[in-house]
Structures are given as C-alpha cells and as structure tokens.
Image (cartoon, grey):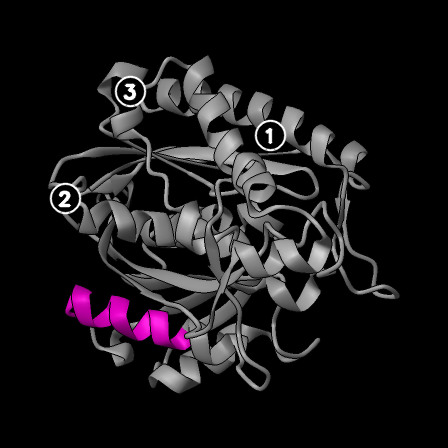
Amino acid sequence: MSDSAVAQRTAGVLGCGTALPLAAVPSSAVAARIGVEESWILERTGIRSRRHAAAGERLSDLAAAAGAVALQRAGVDADDLDLVLVATMTADELTPNAAPLVAHALGARRAGTFDVGAACTAFLSALAAGAAFVEAGRADRVLVVGADLISRVTDHDDRQTAALFADGAGAVVLGAGAGGALGPALLRSDGAHARTIFATRERGTIEMDGPETFRHAVNRLSEVSLEAVEAAGLALEDIDVFVYHQANARITRAVGTRLALDPGKVVDCIGELGNTSAATLPLALARAEADGLLVPGAKVLLAAFGAGFTWGGAVLEW
C-alpha cells in the first residue's frame, strides 16, 4: 500500500451494539439501603434505575454479546476482524484480559487483542487506538467494546457512590473507508488528582470525593469539547449530537449550560442506565441512533472524564 493511500485512510463506524444485564435496580431500593429518600438520589444523579449483573455473570460474556450485535449490524464477520479492543476496569480475572476471551467467544480467530484501562475514558481511548490502526493501514476492521461491571467494585452502603454505578456493555465496529470518520482524538490526564477517584486492591471498592470530581469533570469536559471541535476544524454550532460520558446528570447539564448547548442535541440516557464507566459512550451512541439523531453525515462530539484523572474528546462523523 502506498504512503499516499495510507495517509488518506479514515476510520468510521460501521455499526454499534449493546448488551445489558437483566436485573434492574430502582433508585427506591438503593435509597432504602443507604437511608435517604429516592428524591435525594434523583436530584443528585438523575438516575431512576440501573442494571446490576447477577452473581455468576461475566464481563467477557456481556462484552461479547454487545460485540456480536455490533458485528451483525455492521455486516462484518468475526473472522474478518483484525483487532478486538476491550475498554474496561473490571475484567473477570487479573489475567487473562477480557479482549482475548471476547475474540474467542465471537470466533475472531485471526484478531489481535488487548484491553484498554483508562477508567471512564477508556472507550474513547480504545476508539482512538482502533482508529489509528485503521488509519495507519495496520487493520481494516476493528471491534471496540466498552464494558464494565462497576457494581462489583461499588460499596453499596456508601452514599457517595452507591446510587451512581451500574453495569453494561456497548461496542462499535470500525472500518476503513466507512461513510463517516473519527477526527483528531484529544486524550489528556492529570495524575495529581489520582486520589479523588480510586480503588485500592486491599479494599476493592471505589472511593470518590464527589464535589471535587464534579468540579473537575465539568471544567475538563467543557474545555476538551471546545478543543476537540477546534481540532476538527469546526465550531460548537456545527455539532449535531453531543455524546458525553454519562457520569451524573448534573455534570452533563452543567457542561451544557456552560457551553450554551441546545439540550435537544445532548444525549441523556443515565436515567435508566446509571454510570456504566467505559460502557457509557457506546450505550449513549446506541441511544442516539435509536432516537434518530445519528443520520448519515451527522457530526457527533464524544467526550469523557474519569479517574486518573483522564479525559478526552473527539468529533465523529456518522
């Protein structure tokens, strides 16, 4: 392949899919456990219900289910995948990673695999990596899955986190020469704030400073939105759909207010799904597609913020 041909390659989304655990946990049940009114949760998070995996359910199975739907909708055979990436912080075992298990379950016999760990920013990071492989001519078809079982690392008696976190999986298939394309992906980090959201191996559950997380998330998401749009040669007014990490409805609304965004263009699906960490962006993309927002040529801003701190943004043409 010539250098000029590689330079012109773009990576677009061919199809997306989702998978959720069957069990829905209403906020009323969470509220009763932590000793608050249900309205207390709704006002602070916007979450009415969330999915929790049952005992024995595996992250790799949920991720593979989402991947299978994405492949079917993309019209791509698993055997044609060159790479399978799984963005997660809750793989079933310390090793092996989730990605080889997902590839095996799907029958992607010739695909390379690896996991991407960047907390709630992991799907965007994996998407950027997958797109780079396609753009460089090192892959033609890449499956990118965002999947987390955050209920497994949540202290269900902690008011800071018990109502927020949930389980789910979403996936997209990237392909060379697809109708749309992922623009420049801006990925950022600041390890000075590592103890604002963290989970130690000894304790095994997430600890979070809620007010500090809120402040930094709003600031960083607002900043990277502007930076990503500018890097794509666009303005906020050119964006058709804003897909933010579904961390907390108050965060999404605060970013929308700061940037003066049209609420009708901002995807909000946290109410029935909760914060599924690496799965929120693909789940939100699927919701936008189901709602008819992702017409061909639509310009979509993706942005996420998570522990580390990590954050990032990119514009995707659908």
Q: Amino acid at mark 2?
A: Gly
Which numbered tag is attached to residue 217?
A: 1
Q: Is residue 213 above or below residue 203?
A: above
Q: Are marks 2 and 3 in contact (CB under 8 Å)?
A: no
Chain-order first, disc 2 or disc 1: 1
* Segment tinted magenta in the rendering: 64-75
Q: Are marks 2 and 1 in contact (CB under 8 Å)?
A: no
Chain-order first, disc 2 or disc 3: 3
Percent across and percent down for residue 127 are 41, 50
Q: CA distance from mark 2 to mark 3?
A: 16 Å
Q: Is residue 24 above or below residue 311?
A: below
Q: Which residue is mark 2?
A: 292
Percent across and percent down for residue 254 are 50, 22
Q: CA distance from mark 2 to mark 1?
A: 28 Å
Q: Are marks 1 and 3 in contact (CB under 8 Å)?
A: no
Q: Main secondary structure of the magenta part?
A: helix
Which residue corresponds to the image point at 68% horizontal and 33% vertical from the top-left? 213
Bin the neighbour count of mark 2 within 10 Å (Cα to Cα): few under 14, some 14-19, many 20 and up.
few
Q: Nearer the viewer, residue 144 or 61?
A: 61
